[in-house]
Amino acid sequence: MRKYEVMYIIRPDIEQEAVQATVEKFQGIISNGGEITKHDVMGKRRLAYEINKFRDGTFVLVNFNGTPEVLTELERLMKISDEVIRYLITLDVA
């Protein structure tokens, strides 16, 4: 298993319960074949530039160990999710 870091931004116009449900959905995907080492919901923050007519969003940072299959499934679901406006998955070398 390799170490990864994912940061994603959730739309600001959804309710807190929907934000929590989205976070739990992605945690479940990672936990299915990997292990979460650090999870941080950073809260609502202003974006540097407008994305899909949104000026702010809820930032979530997750460090995890996982297989390439987990990474592929996580990326696939983030692409099609309406709640996520932007995401970035990187290999954690630290």
Image: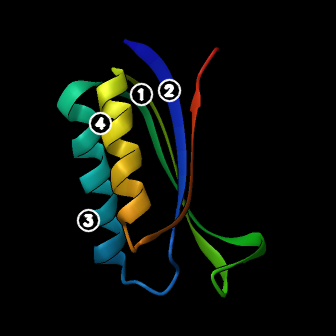
Q: Point out the tag, 1 or 2, that comes first from the N-terminus.
A: 2
Which residue position is annotated with label 1?
A: 64
Q: Are marks 1 and 2 in contact (CB under 8 Å)?
A: yes
The alpha-carbon separation of the residues under discs 4 and 3 comes to 14 Å
**Quadrant hosting residue 83:** bottom left
Which residue position is annotated with label 4?
A: 30
Q: Helix, strand or loop at disc 3?
A: helix
Q: Point out the tag, 4 or 3, that comes first from the N-terminus.
A: 3
Identify the residue at image location x=44%, y=14%: 2
The alpha-carbon separation of the residues under discs 1 and 3 comes to 19 Å
Q: Can residue 72 be seen in this view?
A: yes
Q: Point out the tag, 4 or 1, that comes first from the N-terminus.
A: 4
Indicate which label's residue lies in the foreground, 2 or 3: 2
Identify the residue at image location x=36%, y=50%: 76
Q: Point out the tag, 2 or 3, that comes first from the N-terminus.
A: 2
Few, some or many C-alpha atoms within 10 Å of disc 2 (few <14, some 14-19, many ≥20)?
many
Q: Helix, strand or loop at disc 4?
A: helix
Three-letter amino acid code at the position of disc 2? Tyr
Q: Do the residues labelled 4 and 3 touch (CB within 8 Å)?
A: no
Identify the residue at image location x=29%, y=44%: 27
In the picture, the quarter occupied by the C terminus is: top right
Q: Is residue 91 above or below residue 90?
A: above
Three-letter amino acid code at the position of disc 1? Phe
Which residue position is annotated with label 3?
A: 21
Q: Helix, strand or loop at disc 2?
A: strand
The alpha-carbon separation of the residues under discs 4 and 1 comes to 8 Å
Q: Are marks 4 and 1 in contact (CB under 8 Å)?
A: yes
Which residue position is annotated with label 2?
A: 4
Three-letter amino acid code at the position of disc 4? Ile
Q: Position of residue 79 (x, y in %)?
A: 43, 59
